Image (cartoon, rainbow, N blue to C red):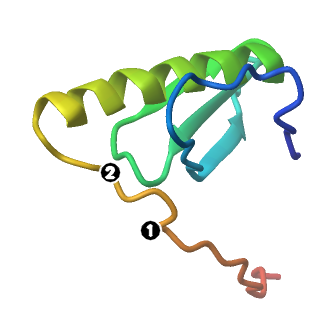
Amino acid sequence: MALSNAGVPKANHDHDETFTVAIYEAEEGGYWAEVLELPGCASQGESLDELRANIIDAIGAVLEVYAEDGERPRPGAVSTMSVRVPLPA
């Protein structure tokens, strides 16, 4: 499942950052997501569009806390991989 940035307004900043967002289907319906470079940064939504808006808001809130603390996150500091494992018979 891939989401594009179509329809996402550009921020009025000198530059944008890209974060790795893992998206999961919620058992009760809808979706939830976590930002891998920002531990504890997560959100949910009934649709992928709602999830996108909510996770962008969550990232913004976490980045404000980083700025208040004089810290900078490390976007892209996470690597992902796929592994194939045999399933028990």
Vertical position of residue 86 compared to residue 38: above or below = below
**Residue type indicated by callout 1:** Ala
Which residue lies at the image location 55% right of the left edge and 74% below the top edge? 79
Q: Position of residue 84 (x, y in %)?
A: 77, 85
Q: State the residue in front, 38 or 86.
A: 38
Q: Position of residue 23 (x, y in %)?
A: 69, 41
Vertical position of residue 19 compared to residue 50: above or below = below
Q: Quadrant of the C terminus?
A: bottom right
In what element is the residue under mark 1? loop
Q: State the residue in front, 84 or 52.
A: 52
* Pointer 1 residue: 77
**Residue type indicated by callout 2:** Pro
Q: Position of residue 12 (x, y in %)?
A: 55, 22
* Pointer 2 residue: 73
Instruction: Give the CA separation, mark 2 to mark 1.
Output: 9 Å
Quadrant hosting residue 4: top right
In what element is the residue under mark 2? loop
Quadrant hosting residue 87: bottom right
